Amino acid sequence: MDALDARILLAVDDDPEASALALARSLGIARNTLHARLKRLRAEGVVREFSRRVDPAALGQALVAFVSVVLSQPSGPRATAALGAFPEVVEMHSTTGDADLLLKIVARDTADLHRLSGELLAVPDVVRISTVVSLREELPPRTRALIERAAAERPPQAARPVRGASRRGAAEGAGGGRGCGHPLRE
């Protein structure tokens, strides 16, 4: 990822509803450049699916817990696949230390967490779990500061004027041409 990619991500973060044309103009780049770079960033997994931005509490899953999971050796991918099949498991990390995995899970309440804990323990190759309940999120997941640093590391290339921008007319500005919609959904 280069500085222009980072600037594009910041622009989308600043105005997620902006059209591709508006973003390209604000960045001083061609719309095709914006599309090509966003397509590459999506293909490389830099830009992830929109559902990752949805707050689980809005779906009735306000309780957050972290579960350390000890697996039998060798368990292979069978246990991780089974644990990943639970919708309440929103993140899973392989770890060093006493546990093999760290799960971030969501639940409706403590009774739901208790039910889920029993189901996690029933997964083949899970030896034991240890659960810590989050009382409050002190710092939500964030990457903006890292993107800002990436955008500042190398000076952006001199932006070329968008050819024909004045000739394209009001049709594109009003959302009338191909590719003028939301850049992450095209």
Image (cartoon, helix red, strand yellow):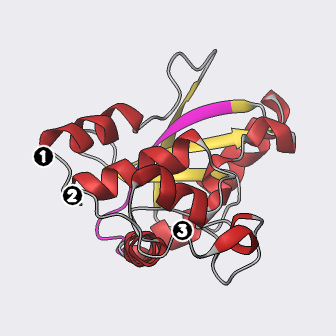
Query: Which of the numbered marks, if any, corresponds to residue 80?
Result: none
Taking the magenta stretch, the answer to whether it contains residue 98 is no
Question: Which label is found at residue 154?
Answer: 1
Compare marks 3 and 1 and give the one earlier in the sequence. 3
Identify the magenta region.
64-76
Query: Within 10 Å of the Cα at label 1, are there few (<14), some (14-19), or many (20+) other Cα atoms?
Result: few
Tell me, yes or no, if residue 180 can be seen here. no
Give coordinates of residue 11: x percent, y percent.
48, 47
Q: Residues within 10 Å of mark 3 (few under 14, many from 20)?
A: some
SS at badge 1: loop
- Evaluate whether residue 127 shows in this view: yes
Identify the residue under disc 3: 124
Q: Secondary structure at mark 2?
A: loop
Return the x and y of residue 18 as percentages of the image width and height. Answer: 65, 53
Query: Which residue in the protein does label 2 denote?
Result: 2
**Residue 60 at x, y = what percent?**
87, 39
Task: State yes or no: discs 3 and 1 in contact (Cβ < 8 Å).
Answer: no
Residue 52 drawn at (x, y percent): 61, 53
Residue furthest bottom as drawn: 178
Amino acid at circle 2: Asp
Q: Residues within 10 Å of mark 2 (few under 14, many from 20)?
A: few
Q: CA distance from mark 2 to mark 3?
A: 44 Å
The amino acid pointed to by label 3 is Pro
